[in-house]
Amino acid sequence: MSIIDSHCHTGQNYGLTGIEGSIAPLERYLIRAGEVGITKTILFSTLSPNYPISNREVARIVTINPNRFYGFVFVHAQRDRGRIHDMVKETVEQFGFCGIKVHRHDASITREVCEAARRFSLPILYDLMGEISQVEFLAQEYPDVSFIIPHLGSFGDDWKAQTGLIKYLVSYTNIYTDTSGVRRFDILEEAVHRAGAVKIIFGTDGPWLHPGVELSKIYALNLSHYENELILCRNILRLIKHTEVVASNPSFKYQFL
């Protein structure tokens, strides 16, 4: 069975996780991921003061290693306003990126981001930092856009937000969550029970969290083989439509070495 980690960062860290200004190293993550059978990883930038530059660094890694990585384009909903369509277009058409990442630490998601996702048929991984009240609006306003809400709604262990997100997973076909950093196992178990494995996506929040620890939570759910497949690979592959990361510009990978 293939295992896809749908949530991993790379690049210089500018806040929230780890030490300010530190590097999110992939070397140790890749060793650990390989040891537990993770075969492919969705990669995107850390929080950054310049996402066009950070996205190109992600693209360099992805295009050199197309059999190991998928890429998501990270956008700042306010700072990048007016150019988000072009940022997404470049990464999709030139580098084969297959999703969009947005973080409320930067700014709340905007219609411009959602319209770009709709235009290119991409899922949005939106970390809303516990502000789950936004989910219903997004689900209703953009029923043709798939939204992945990581950490079951809150990396900060806000159990009210995490429990509250479950009702949206149940109610809306276009709302999903990932398992990265979810420490309250009973709430994760409740989410799978109420919403079904079809709405849950495996992620690690690498390279900071150990992929083996994050993966063990999935196995601890004691699901069927098919349900494990849904969470570990089938759900995310359906959302990204099996996009293969192949840059249309063959010289790209050498421009940044």
Image (cartoon, rainbow, N blue to C red):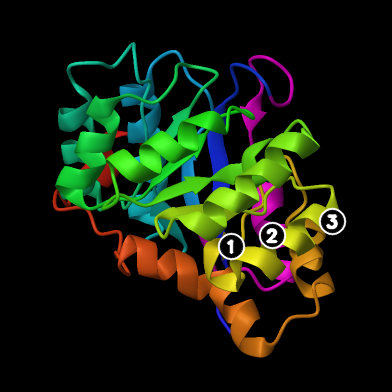
In this rendering, the answer to whether 71 lies above or below 199 is above
Q: Which circle's residue, 1 or 3, is located before the other in the chain?
A: 3
Asked if the magenta segment contains residue 77, the reply would be no
Which residue: 67% across, 54% down?
A: 179
Q: Nearer the viewer, mark 2 or mark 1?
A: 2
Mark 2 vs mark 3, CA separation in Å? 10 Å
Secondary structure category for the residue under label 1 = strand
Residue 35 x %, y % = 74, 69
Q: Which label sits on residue 75? A: none
Residue 211 x %, y % = 73, 57
In the picture of the structure, the residue carrying the numbered disc 2 is 191
In the picture of the structure, the residue carrying the numbered disc 3 is 185
In the picture of the structure, the residue carrying the numbered disc 1 is 200
Q: Residues within 10 Å of mark 2 (few under 14, many from 20)?
A: many
- Write down the region rendered in magenta: 17-41
Q: Which quadrant is home to the N terminus?
A: bottom right
Q: Nearer the viewer, residue 228 or 98?
A: 228
Q: Nearer the viewer, mark 2 or mark 3?
A: 2
What amino acid is found at the position of numbered circle 1 in the picture?
Answer: Ile
Secondary structure category for the residue under label 3 = helix
Residue 55 x %, y % = 36, 33
What amino acid is found at the position of numbered circle 3 in the picture?
Answer: Phe
CB contact under 8 Å: marks 2 and 1: yes
